[in-house]
């Protein structure tokens, strides 16, 4: 099967050696996606909801570049640094996925690469075969 790597232009992609998304056949995986602002830096410093919106914006653009749509997402992950604030990120997730309802995990970690990042997301999608 053909492998397609999708870049979002993150400055971390060449350093770490990863792609924002990888598509093989009908399967698309979106890497951990941080709230990197257009032009660099952190989008919405201190604002969990704004950061979550930015993470989803980046992820959904990568999905589209890989030929997938939000309704193709079967699994998502919301990763936060402060579990007491999980609902702020989860509500934004619900704005996009409330009707789609992929399998979703919410978890906390001790921190991310940039200490200003409050949330990251990951997701997986399966693109239906033509005619399905």
Image (cartoon, rainbow, N blue to C red):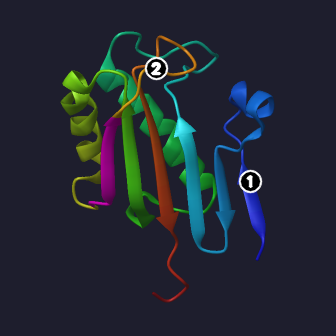
Residue corresponding to mark 1:
5
Residue occupying the far front of the picture: 110
Left or right, 42 with respect to 20, comes to left
Which quadrant holds residue 121? top left
Left or right, 123 with respect to 28, comes to left
Q: Earlier in the sequence, mark 2 or mark 1?
A: 1
Which quadrant holds residue 78? top left
> How far across and how far down the image is residue 74, in percent?
40, 64
Left or right, 49 with respect to 7, comes to left
> How far across and how far down the image is residue 101, in percent?
26, 60
Please name whichever residue, 77 or 44, is drawn nearer the observer in this view of the structure: 77
Residue at image position (68%, 29%) is 10
Residue 106 sits inside the magenta stretch: yes
Residue 15 sits inside the magenta stretch: no
Residue occupying the far bottom of the picture: 131
Residue at image position (22%, 53%) is 98
Residue at image position (25%, 44%) is 95
Q: Which residues are magenta?
A: 101-107
Decide: is 132 above or below 77.
Answer: below
Residue corresponding to mark 2:
111
> How far across and how far down the image is residue 41, in percent?
58, 12
Please name whichever residue, 126 or 82, is drawn nearer the observer in this view of the structure: 82
Of the 4 image quadrants, the one containing the C terminus is bottom left
Decide: is 5 above or below 49.
Answer: below
Q: Quick one: SS at disc 1?
A: strand
């Amino acid at each position: 099967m053909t492998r397609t790597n999708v870049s979002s232009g993150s400055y971390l992609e060449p350093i770490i050696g990863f792609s924002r998304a990888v598509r093989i056949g009908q399967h698309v995986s979106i890497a951990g996606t941080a709230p990197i602002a257009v032009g660099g830096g952190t989008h919405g410093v201190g604002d969990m909801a704004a950061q979550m919106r930015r993470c989803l914006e980046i992820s959904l653009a990568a999905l589209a570049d890989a030929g997938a749509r939000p309704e193709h997402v079967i699994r998502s992950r919301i990763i936060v640094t402060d579990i007491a604030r999980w609902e702020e990120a989860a509500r934004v997730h619900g704005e996009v996925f409330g009707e789609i309802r992929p399998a979703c995990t919410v978890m906390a970690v001790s921190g991310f690469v940039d200490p200003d990042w409050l949330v990251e997301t990951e997701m997986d999608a399966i693109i239906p075969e033509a005619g399905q």
